[in-house]
Image (cartoon, rainbow, N blue to C red):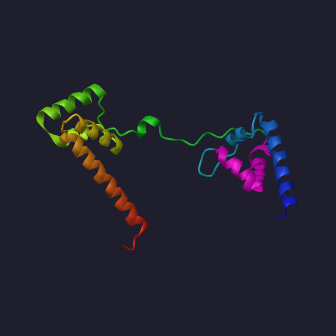
Amino acid sequence: MSIDTKQKNLKEVEEVLQRAIKKVGVKKINDLCKFIPLNSGGYIHHFTLKKMKKKNPEELGEMVKKFIINVDRPRAVAPKPRAARGSRKKRDQITFNKWQLDRMLNIARLAGDKEIISILSPKKSLATYKRELIQTIRQGKIDQELWNGYVEGVNAQNSIFADHSLLSNPSN
């Protein structure tokens, strides 16, 4: 297809889109999306409409003619049904506020349960662990939990790197 025919097709599609805008009474081309249905339900996304305008203007023109221009009274398509936001949450998961979490962490510390302490403690970055370790060493203190957290972070990082290198070099 030559450049002239592409420009001609684009001009024709622009004219069809302008006629559709006037017919439906919307302000922008993106607002036409609500009048063009999809096979999967709902209406066409505005990104898809823009993409079709550039890559496949003939098909877009045909869709606009079919669903807007050649129809006596075009009707807006109902949006695709989606799950409510609250239903996506995990229902069996217990949530605690900061005060409750701190209290449980103190109880675990008093009981000496290191596993629960590590689960309830907020996760820190390796840089934070390094900084805090250096500060405690300068103060002449030894914090075993801080060291264990640092070691755990380094091991986790090393395992991620090892997994990544295995994925990128499967021949090893």
Left or right: 52, with 4 as reference point:
left
Q: Quadrant of the C terminus?
A: bottom left
Q: Residue at x 62, y 52 (%)?
A: 39
Residues rendered magenta in the picture: 43-71
Q: Position of residue 135 (x, y in %)?
A: 27, 36
Q: Residue at x 79, y 38 (%)?
A: 21
Q: Quadrant of residue 34?
A: top right
100 and 40: which is toward the camera: 100
Q: Is residue 55 above or below residue 72?
A: below
Q: Position of residue 153 (x, y in %)?
A: 30, 48
Q: Quadrant of residue 171?
A: bottom left
35 and 137: which is toward the camera: 137
Q: Residue at x 39, y 64 (%)?
A: 165
Q: Quadrant of the N terminus?
A: bottom right
Q: Residue at x 71, y 40 (%)?
A: 30
24 and 102: which is toward the camera: 102
Left or right: 41, with 126 as reference point:
right
* Residue 49 is inside the magenta segment: yes
Q: Position of residue 154 (x, y in %)?
A: 30, 51
Marks counted in the figure total: 0
Left or right: 77, with 15 as reference point:
left
Q: Position of residue 91 (x, y in %)?
A: 33, 38
* Residue 61 is inside the magenta segment: yes
